[in-house]
């Protein structure tokens, strides 16, 4: 994985640190990870007031998680360790609302690796500071978002339009804490 030189500078310059590393993984690599997560299985969640999506807590990708932790440490300049990881799959009609997110007091770093097979228009991850979107992560297969979470930063995954029949948005969500 080649880290753009500007990633660390962009992270350091932002009052609310967040950056996207484009093409962090190849389409072939993403397909292999997607297949392994699919094989482990997803659980469907349909909580109308919070979200409609599928989640897999069976992410057995230790090498990938080590590499992603290293990239995040390089971008942030912090010593980080894995706290949790899971995969989300959103299809036409799915979403996750901010009220489904949780508050983090210790300023962990969240990674979102887009493992989707194709771009899905409008399928974004929104990071909000005190309710206002300050960072939008577009659907970009292979990209990696690195975002510092804190008590005023919440996250939601936007609605995947039913017009995109057959759409599949797959994201690996990783939470890292300082060591």
Image (cartoon, grey):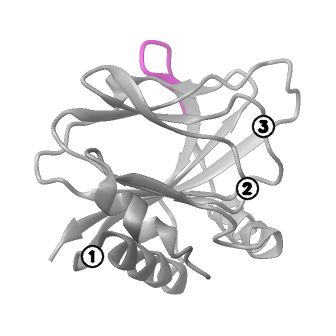
Q: Secondary structure at mark 1?
A: loop
- Kindly identify the residue that appears in the image at 68 percent across and 72 percent down: 25
Q: Secondary structure at mark 2?
A: loop
Which image quadrant for residue 84? Answer: bottom left
- Horizontally, residue 159 falls left or right of residue 19, namely right
Q: Which mark is residue 141?
A: 2
Q: According to the image, label 3 marks what residue?
A: 120
Mark 3 closeness class: few <14, some 14–19, many ≥20 residues within 10 Å: many
- Kindly identify the residue that appears in the image at 27 percent across and 47 percent down: 149
x, y percentage for residue 128?
35, 29
Of 95 and 59, nearer the camera is 95
Disc 1 or 2, which lies upstream in sequence?
A: 1
x, y percentage for residue 57?
47, 57
Q: Is residue 38 magenta?
A: no
Of 56 and 142, nearer the camera is 142
- Horizontally, residue 35 falls left or right of residue 42, namely right
Q: Which residue is situated farthest in the top direction here?
A: 49
Residue 63 vertical position relative to residue 162 in the rendered view, above or below: below
- Kindly identify the residue that appears in the image at 70 percent across and 59 percent down: 38
Exactly how many numbered labels are in the figure? 3
Measured Cα–Cα span from mark 1 to mark 2: 25 Å
- Horizontally, residue 92 falls left or right of residue 111, namely right
Residue 32 vertical position relative to residue 45 in the rendered view, above or below: below
User: Does the magenta stretch mainly form a helix, a strand or a loop?
Assistant: strand
- Horizontally, residue 23 falls left or right of residue 88, namely right
Task: Write down the region rendered in magenta.
Answer: 44-51
Measured Cα–Cα span from mark 1 to mark 3: 32 Å
Q: Which mark is residue 77?
A: 1
Quarter of the image for the N terminus: give it.
bottom right
Measured Cα–Cα span from mark 2 to mark 3: 9 Å
């Amino acid at each position: 994985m080649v880290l753009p030189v500007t990633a660390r500078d962009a992270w350091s310059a932002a009052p609310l640190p967040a950056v996207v590393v484009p093409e962090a993984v190849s389409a072939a690599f993403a397909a292999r990870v997607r297949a392994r997560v699919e094989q482990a299985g997803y659980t469907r969640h349909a909580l109308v007031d919070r979200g409609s999506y599928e989640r897999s807590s069976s992410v057995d990708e230790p090498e990938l998680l080590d590499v992603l932790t290293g990239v995040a440490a390089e971008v942030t300049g912090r010593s980080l360790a894995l706290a949790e990881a899971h995969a989300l799959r959103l299809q036409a009609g799915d979403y996750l609302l901010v009220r489904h997110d949780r508050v983090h007091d210790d300023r962990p770093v969240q990674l979102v690796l887009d493992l989707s097979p194709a771009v899905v228009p409008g399928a974004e991850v929104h990071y909000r500071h005190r309710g206002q979107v300050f960072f939008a992560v577009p659907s970009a297969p292979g990209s990696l978002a690195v975002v510092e979470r804190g008590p005023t930063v919440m996250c939601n995954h936007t609605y995947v339009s039913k017009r995109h029949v057959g759409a599949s948005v797959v994201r690996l969500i990783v939470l890292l804490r300082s060591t």
